[in-house]
Amino acid sequence: MNSALGPLDYRVPADMAVEPGSIVVAPLGPRQLLGVVWEPDRLKSDAEVGDNRLRNLLAVADAAPIGAPLRRLIEWTSDYYLAPPASVMRMTLASTSALEGARLVIEYRATGEVPDRLTPQRAQALERIGDRQGLIRELATVADVSEGVIRGLVKAGAIRAVEVDIDSPYPVPDPDYAPPVLSDEQRSAADRLVAGVSAHRFEPTLLDGVTGSGKTEVYFEAVAEAIRRDRQTLVLLPEIALTEPFLKRFHDRFGCEPVAWHSGLRSTQRRRAWRAIQSGEALVTVGARSALFLPYARLGLLVVDEAHEVSFKQEEGVHYHARDVAVMRGKFEDCPVILASATPAIETRQQVAQGRYAEVQLPARFGAAEMPVIEAIDLIAQPPERGRWLAPRIVAELRDNLEKREQSLLFLNRRGYAPLTLCRSCGHRFQCPNCTAWMVEHRLTRRIACHHCGHAEPTPRLCPECQGEDSLVACGPGVERIADEVTALFPDARVAVVTSDTIWSPAKAAEFVGRMDAGDIDVVVGTQLVTKGYHFPNLTLVGVVDADLGLEGGDLRAAERTFQQIRQVSGRAGRGSKPGRVFIQTHSPQAQVMQALVTGDADAFYAAETQARRDAGAPPFGRYAAIIVSSEDQAAAHEAARMIGRSAPHEEGMAVYGPAPAPLAMLRGRHRYRLLVHARRALDVQDVIREWLSNLVWPAKVRVAVDVDPYSFL
């Protein structure tokens, strides 16, 4: 499948049976590509081809045809987000091995034996592989070593071959395995969601419940009803790290785990999951946003958990938003969609206000748990000690919590040790060679890294500018620096740093949850990864180290995102019988967003934010689309961007700003320019942009991408 190509015409051999949706193998020049048969009246070819020039299809895959509802979703996503249909279809055919017949494969796993010759690479491989099992190339990727190292461990007896039936059936969830005891409020909410599943009709519903109100237990009742009716459910989670805690909660309720779908799966696991989903055997799937495009045989329920999360927006390739695409999939499948959130997005709230979405509320925490007390710490009036980042009040509260043997969480949405490293002798700043971004020091791994392109290198001993030795100084705090401060203040405290650098897989997330549940961690220092989905009854204190950080950058959603993040992280405190306290360090305690957090007056905050959006004609009352022009050749990117800007159409109710260098002017070695289209809500801005760009030609080395409804303005 080539995303650069449009639809192509082929002849169907007389002995081959195909229908719309059939997955086929087609010749293209000397190559063979996968494709999907489409209705001829829905996707037009660029040119008519005579029958005598048509080439035959080669084969039909061993898989059921892609259903009409999913084909309509692919068309809608392609049209709305201005993406080639093949790029969207690639997410549906995400496991090409799934299109082959059933088979056995040989995988490999560690035996527990240590080879006589234990080189550093072999030791690293065995440590990182742990109890994982997979193909040699998969284990090599996990271990970050060559395949030769893995083969050497096989010969040494440290890793052995295992024969695996990769299509073995999944266990079936039992809807009556362990029904929860629900409060009257929860039961009423669950009954409404169950009724939607029973009716089997399209109805988007916002499940709006405060943190700790039991939203998961409530929508699990709707999942149970779908299982009873032999219909499939998809639960979308915003982060791969949340998958493992969810699997445990699901197992406790239904007696087995659901089918998981995310980027951390091995190829054999993806094949097994894809085939089970397409056959209808997989009754419940939990997955990342790409799971939306899988070929469910009989979808009966869609749940988007933490539906406000910005990570549901895909920032590369097809720039879709999983929350909105989930609603459209529910429409095409004619099944209910549940959007669960403690801090719904303004766009979702507006859909409720207009009567397009139903709403079910859970305004109180379950049982004896109460919402935590929230207090702002004015950093101007109560500054931290010189050289430190934690205010005296938070230090005192940490000491109190440690004495009571209760757990604490310090939140700072900045990975690494410090956001900027410079030379104290000459002032040299370490910048990424591929991006206009500073390199971030990571002392745990003794490296400096770019968080945009992934470039990393060992922390240098000498300044590359003045050759000064041991002259590097860290500026500003990251989570590692805060963890160091906690350790210096409380040497006996058991501190854990939780970021995407330390929790990079569901297994790592499960390990962290296990340590928290066992009481092996006293203080967690983490980024946004810890703001959602976790339930730790003994966690009673939350400190937000820099609440102003999210307000930087001029993003139209900055205040809303800050409110959501801090409200979510505050919700980690006091989820059990012990009361929770939350302290927010800020230089602007009187700011509207800080006052809303302290008083708990979310309605007033959202009303003001919504009015500001309405006045500005910003989403959801207006429309944005970004056009990003990039190239390794700066002059070519600049000229193409200027050409696009000069040819901008003059449409009533639409303005085009730019081009201007993107705030992140170079990313992964490519120079970037941006244009921003701002249009009134009623304008079909996709049609305007499609016609506008289709009339232009730019050099092959220039890439032009369109981001409809952008969330990132970098």
Image (cartoon, rainbow, N blue to C red):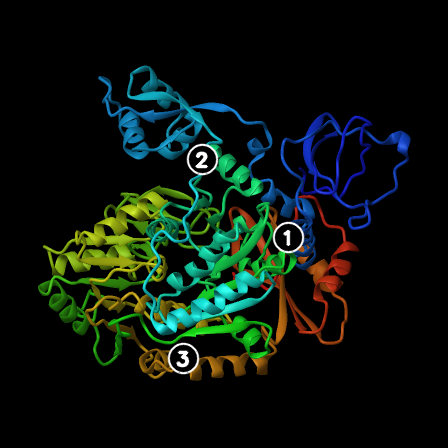
How far is mark 1 from mark 2, CA to CA?
38 Å
Please tell me in which quadrant of the rendered image residue 106 appears: top left
How far is mark 1 from mark 3, CA to CA?
44 Å
Picture coordinates of residue 396, whole percent (x, y): 13, 71
Say the numbered circle drawn on residue 637.
1
Picture coordinates of residue 313, whole percent (x, y): 52, 58
Q: Upstream in the sequence, badge 1 or badge 2? A: 2
Picture coordinates of residue 381, whole percent (x, y): 23, 81
Residue at horizontal 46 percent and vertical 79 percent from the top: 606
Q: Quadrant of the N terminus?
A: top right
The residue beneath circle 3 is: 602
The amino acid marked with disc number 3 is Ala
The front one of 212 and 496 is: 212
Residue at horizontal 42 percent and vertical 47 percent from the top: 173
Please tell me in which quadrant of the rendered image residue 576 appears: bottom left
Say the numbered circle drawn on residue 266.
2
Residue 325 visible (yes or no): yes
Badge 3 crowding class, 10 Å Cα cut-off, few under 14, some 14 to 19, many 20 or more, is some
Residue at horizontal 20 percent and vertical 68 percent from the top: 577
Badge 1 crowding class, 10 Å Cα cut-off, few under 14, some 14 to 19, many 20 or more, is many
